[in-house]
């Protein structure tokens, strides 16, 4: 099983290799098999990519938003035509089941290209400001060269979520995928060129934690958009701030999902499972602290245990598989350590907590895991685990659960399940998070803004709000008469 690209990097419309860069292997998480060998970007590769972006950007910015959008919409059509091929590559890259990637990964990337390609002409307009005889007007203008730094959980989606608003706004982008999932972004770059994107506007370079600072610190870069962990976000934001660059941070979370006693329990259990086990729990917005009102706790746990133990674990390329491996062995081992910590600190292991049977020994599988009787001070209730580990906490009343839900440095997401719609709106209004759901969880269509508050980041992905983070507002005052001066 091989997925070797033509070269490690895609710069100025073509594949580029520099074997002086540190070599690294891309592994298929289900078997540990090497599916590709690539090289991290050298400083020369970084300079080449940024130079290509800087050269191509002015001519691209001179086009109308409609003309730019037309290319993105064509790219969306190509992605949909090749959805199966792209989904299989995403599964090889990440280990996520094909039943997920075929509906949630390239398709959401295509949605992003289609949406921004369609709204740009209207959304990038400025305004006219009457000032008596004079007037002023505003324009939204591109920033220039943008850097996108992706995470390994949704590599194709993240590449598109960052590229689409950046490109349609008239910018160029240099994108660095995670070294754990390096393959999908290269295909996105190919498709954009095929759709008619001029060379140099979307470049992909490989690398690790040493590559990011080279990009962020480059003097020709005007904007950095990161999807990653909070510690990484702090470092990148600090480096960008030193040069006063624009920054968008989509970081981690420890999000609360609140289940009131009047909720539809089947839906609440389904929402909690989607918010903890989808993509093997490797989703930043997951509702990993599930607060269940005491009067329904036993019924909730009973239904949750039964449904969790029916999850099909296996070969990600088998469409019957519902849970694949984690992205890497270090990440799997980290999650196993958290599970041991949870048991040691007194949480009740309801189900899971181990490596499943009948899976390849070199794979990075882990059982979906549920802990009950979790308290707010336990490590598993405070720290982001980023794996299929659900923590169930119980509560008595609304005021109590809201206070406990907010008692965290994170503020990415939150969810509420209740049949009382008045309470639902009242509670989400009090919860300190950027993206919230009522009676569902983790739905993120491109039409709505996505992002966090507090230590979970700032700025927004998706929706017309994203365009504000890839443009600057230019104001022009127009005088209609002679200048009167007291000199």
Image (cartoon, grey):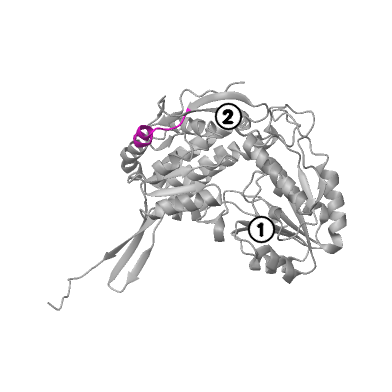
Q: Nearer the viewer, residue 197 or 158?
A: 158
Answer few, some or many: residues within 10 Å of disc 2's Cα (few below 14, many 20 plus, some between 14 and 19).
some
Q: Nearer the viewer, residue 41 or 173?
A: 41
Q: What's the residue at 40%, 30% (across, down)?
A: 13
Q: What's the residue at 38%, 32% (across, down)?
A: 45
Q: What's the residue at 87%, 51% (across, down)?
A: 302
Corner quadrant of residue 54: top left
Corner quadrant of residue 311: top right
- Asked if the stretch drawn in magenta spans residue 44, the answer is yes
Tag on residue 82? Answer: 2
Position of residue 143 in the picture relative to residue 426 (left or right): left
Q: Is residue 389 visible?
A: no
Instruction: State which quarter of the image contains the C terminus.
Output: bottom left
Where does the magenta region start and end? 39-48
- Up the image or down, 477 lies above or below 46; here it is below
* Residues at marks 1 and 2, CA–CA distance in whole angstroms: 34 Å
Q: Position of residue 270 (x, y in %)?
A: 77, 49
Please name the residue that numbered disc 1 is placed on.
414
Q: Earlier in the sequence, mark 1 or mark 2?
A: 2
Q: Is residue 289 visible?
A: yes
Looking at this view, name the residue that lies furthest to the top: 1
- Up the image or down, 486 lies above or below 412; here it is below
Position of residue 231 in the picture relative to residue 326 (left or right): left
Q: Position of residue 94 (x, y in %)?
A: 62, 34
């Amino acid at each position: 099983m091989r997925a070797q690209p033509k070269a490690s990097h895609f710069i100025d419309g073509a594949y580029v290799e520099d074997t002086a860069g540190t070599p690294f292997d891309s592994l298929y998480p289900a078997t540990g098999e090497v599916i590709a060998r690539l090289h991290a970007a050298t400083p020369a590769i970084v300079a080449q990519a940024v130079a290509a972006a800087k050269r191509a950007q002015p001519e691209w910015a001179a086009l109308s938003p409609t003309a730019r959008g037309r290319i993105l919409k064509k790219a969306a059509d190509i992605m949909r035509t090749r959805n199966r091929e792209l989904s299989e590559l995403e599964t090889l890259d990440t280990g996520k089941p094909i039943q997920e990637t075929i509906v949630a990964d390239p398709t959401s990337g295509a949605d992003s290209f289609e949406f921004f390609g369609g709204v740009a002409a209207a959304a990038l307009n400025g305004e006219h400001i009457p000032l008596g005889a004079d007037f002023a007007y505003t324009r939204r203008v591109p920033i220039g060269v943008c850097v996108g730094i992706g995470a390994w959980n949704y590599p194709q989606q993240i590449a598109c979520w960052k590229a689409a608003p950046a490109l349609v706004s008239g910018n160029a982008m240099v994108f660095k995928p995670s070294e754990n999932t390096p393959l999908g972004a290269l295909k996105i770059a190919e498709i954009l060129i095929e759709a008619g994107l001029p060379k140099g506007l979307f470049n992909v370079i490989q690398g690790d934690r040493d590559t990011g600072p080279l990009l962020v610190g480059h003097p020709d870069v005007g904007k950095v958009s990161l999807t990653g962990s909070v510690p990484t976000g702090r470092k990148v934001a600090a480096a960008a701030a030193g040069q006063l660059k624009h920054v968008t941070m989509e970081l981690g979370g420890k999000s609360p999902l609140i289940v009131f006693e009047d909720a539809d329990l089947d839906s609440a259990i389904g929402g909690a499972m989607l918010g903890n086990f989808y993509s093997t729990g490797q989703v930043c917005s997951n509702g990993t602290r599930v607060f269940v009102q005491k009067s329904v706790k036993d019924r909730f746990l009973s239904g949750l245990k039964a449904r969790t133990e029916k999850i099909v674990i296996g070969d990600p390329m088998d469409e019957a598989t519902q849970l694949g491996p984690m992205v890497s062995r270090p990440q799997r081992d980290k999650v196993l350590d958290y599970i041991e910590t949870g048991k040691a600190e007194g949480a009740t292991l309801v189900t899971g907590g181990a490596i499943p049977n009948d899976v390849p020994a070199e794979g990075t599988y882990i059982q979906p895991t549920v802990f009950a009787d979790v308290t707010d001070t336990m490590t598993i209730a405070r720290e982001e685990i980023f794996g299929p580990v659900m923590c169930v906490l119980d509560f008595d009343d609304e005021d109590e659960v809201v206070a406990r839900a907010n008692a965290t440095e994170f503020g990415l997401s939150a969810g509420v399940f209740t049949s009382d719609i008045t309470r639902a709106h009242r509670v989400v209004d009090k919860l300190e998070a950027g993206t919230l759901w009522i009676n569902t969880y983790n739905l993120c269509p491109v039409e709505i803004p996505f992002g966090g508050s507090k230590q979970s980041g700032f700025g927004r992905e998706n929706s017309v709000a994203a365009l504000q983070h890839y443009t600057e507002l230019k104001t022009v005052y127009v005088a209609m008469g002679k200048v009167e001066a007291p000199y």
